[in-house]
Image: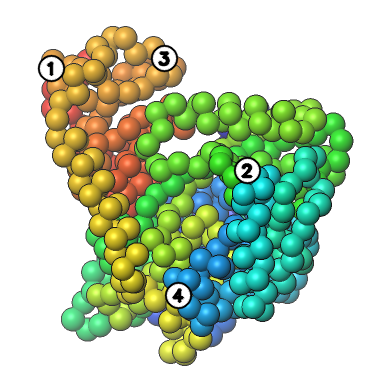
Amino acid sequence: MERRSVWLATAEMPRSAALDTELEVDVAVVGGGIVGLTTALLAQRRGLRVAVLEAATVGAGTTGYTTGKVTAQHGLIYADLVDRHGDDGARRYADAQRAGVEQVADLAAELRIECDLTRAPALTYTRLPEQRSQIEDEVKAAARLGLPARVADRTDLPFDVEAGVVFDDQIHFHPGRYLAGLAAAFTAAGGPIFEGTRVTSIDEQRDRTVELTTPTGKVVAHQVVVATLLPPGLLGGYFARTRPSRSYGLAVRLHGAAPTSMAISIDTPSRSTRPWLDPGPNGLIVVGNGHETGAESDTEAMYADLEAWTRATFDVEAVDYRWSSQDYLTPDRVPYVGHSPTSEQVLVATGFQKWGLSSGTAAAMMLADLLAGNDNPWLPTFDAGRIGGVRTVGRLIKDNLKVGQELVAGRRHDPDARPAAELRPGEGGLVDIGGHTVGGYRDSAGALHTVSPRCSHLGCPLHWNPAETSWDCTCHGSRFSPDGSVLDGPAVRPLGRPTTDTRG
């Protein structure tokens, strides 16, 4: 079994050099995932000079680790959206999702991207009789909003369901190959992509330009699109308006044919499946076991549980790949898209609720309109500066109280930290060195790597993730490698080094 994303392992991703000079453009796009590359391509087609800055490599963020479903069906959401945002707000969300799905299909066809794009029904189901009314309410709400919703009592899954919501004519595809195609089209039209180029600061200038600083160069832009998983640093305060969540994925081969539908359960724990076309009709993607980043200490158990369910449910021949992914949830279930609350030059898109392929493409369409000075009919619902109603504010208060508790806990010495000498090769965790708690990891050669176990973003305590060998922050979702380098923001600086003697 390979411990990496099936989509990145089976795609020929483009490679670009890091920025090593000063550059001036109309639009700087920060982030090389589906939001960033789609926005860059659409803005370029409107006659704007655009550059893309990617901290790692194209697709290395959430897009390369998704389930690969492109659908307007996002679990049970539309009845709730009507309740929270009214019919008009929910209809704008629905219209944006339908347009996002079709934009993906149109770009794949126009650019001749070979990405296994396939039309299929999307199913949200329950196996519990007491949940049936929720399914029926969702179908009524979605149909009223113009979505292709119907109730299903039978499916192609290898078990009975109580009821399900079906949207016909949705999409699954290979997100790595699709991103590679977008990147190729953008660069063929003269747009530069700079990989290995982390933006460490975004500063507005008096002349209404924006200066972006990277370790090896600088970009001056008239407008900036921040299309990272979460805006870096303190930008827009989105770190305090979202919650980070991780989930786990497997790519498996079955002895027989896999279900052809895309499915997700509303029962706990949630299970999501879709066909995986590379091996043929017997390939299947399985995703589940979501939890807040840093909140689960035994992440290896998450994989084991998902694999156990898959083997108990399907006739599994082999598990070929496993990976995990991260996204951010908003308190009112709608992403933030548009101008940052404090800037007319900086635009953002974040909080995609694990449905970023359709929502992210729709966000790119909105951002491209804003960059060109045009209105977009969906923006009132997605407004990046919105605060929300009483329910939203209450959820934000609750989430940030929890963050405050984490922050206080991170200031204390951990009495349970074990001696560094007890770490075996491949193990990590909090260790005691000279009465000080530090983060330790012993590599396969036996060398000990130590870091400060507090996040470089706002100082919250870090939690060791054994399955991904990373340091994860529960407060705002930043993640770091064992040597302290940034894997996921909003942090932009590596972890500090302990000042105590860490030989061992």
Residue situated in front as seen by the camera: 159 or 215: 159
User: In the image, residue 418 lies at what x, y percent?
Assistant: 26, 14
Q: Earlier in the sequence, mark 4 or mark 2?
A: 4
Amino acid type, label 3: Pro
Nearest-to-viewer mark from 3 and 4: 4
Nearer the viewer's eye, disc 3 or disc 1? 1
**Residue 431 position within the rendered picture, expressed as x and y whole percent measured from the top left:** 25, 19
The circle on residue 435 is: 1
Q: CA distance from mark 3 to mark 1?
A: 23 Å
Q: Which mark is residue 271?
A: 2
Nearest to the observer: residue 453 or residue 395:
395
Foreground disc of the pair 4, 1: 4
State which tag comes first along the sequence, 4 or 1: 4
Name the mark nearer the viewer: 1 or 2: 2
Name the one closer to the observer, 430 or 407.
Answer: 407
Three-letter residue code for mark 4 = His
> x, y percentage for residue 404?
20, 46
For the residues marked 3 and 2, what is the alpha-carbon distance in whole angstroms? 33 Å
Q: In the drawing, what numbered circle is on residue 425? A: 3
Q: Earlier in the sequence, mark 3 or mark 4?
A: 4
**Label located before the other in sequence (1 or 2):** 2
Residue lying at 66% horizontally and 31% vertically, measured from the top left: 309
Q: Residue at x 72, y 49 (%)?
A: 162
